[in-house]
Amino acid sequence: MSADMSRVQDILVLEAVDAASARHGEVSVTDVAHELGLDRSGASRMIGTAVDHGYLTRTASTKDARRATLTVTPTGADVLTAAHAFQEEVFARLTATWDLDESAAFARGLRRLADET
């Protein structure tokens, strides 16, 4: 796998952990699999790569020692912040010639699409 593709997968996993954390608190492999629309084994492989890269930690759950809890590391948070800044920059470039109502409607549509997928 190319370094760029690995970075994209890491960002997808970080986004999934961040979203699941906002809803559930403790985040498990199952939560990430659900967020990404993958089976547990596929999500687990992607999580393992993000852990190896230092973007996530995997520790025993405080609620159930049989489960692993995933947490974004400070390095992972930096990657996620940079990814969000890049996404905002691309959005701004794509909509630079649109009026405020058009870009706001597009942003709402993107949020709805993300929420429904």
Image (spheres, helix red, strand yellow):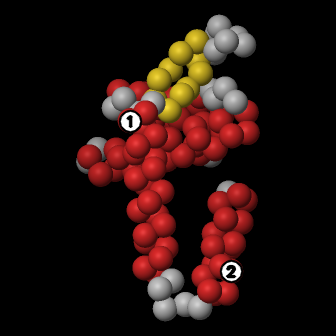
Residue 9 visible? The answer is: no
Quadrant including the C terminus: bottom right
Q: Label 2 belongs to which residue? A: 105
Considering every residue shown, the one lying at the far top of the view is: 65
Q: What residue lies at 65% left-to-right and 36% top-to-bottom?
A: 21
Q: Viewed as shown, does residue 21 lie left or right of 87? A: right
Residue 40 visible? The answer is: yes
Quadrant including the N terminus: top left
The vertical placement of 33 against 107, above or below, is above
N-term mark: 2 or 1? 1
Residue toward you, 112 or 74: 74
Q: Viewed as shown, does residue 111 lie left or right of 15? A: right
Residue toward you, 13 or 45: 13
Residue 43 x/y as whole percent? 53, 35
Mark 1 is on which residue type? Answer: Thr
Give me the disc on residue 8.
none
For the residues labelled 2 and 1, the Cα–Cα distance comes to: 33 Å
Give me the disc on residue 75.
1
Mark 2 is on which residue type? Answer: Ala
For label 1, count other residues whose C-alpha is less than 10 Å away and answer few (under 14), some (14-19) or many (20+).
few
The vertical placement of 101 against 32, above or below, is below
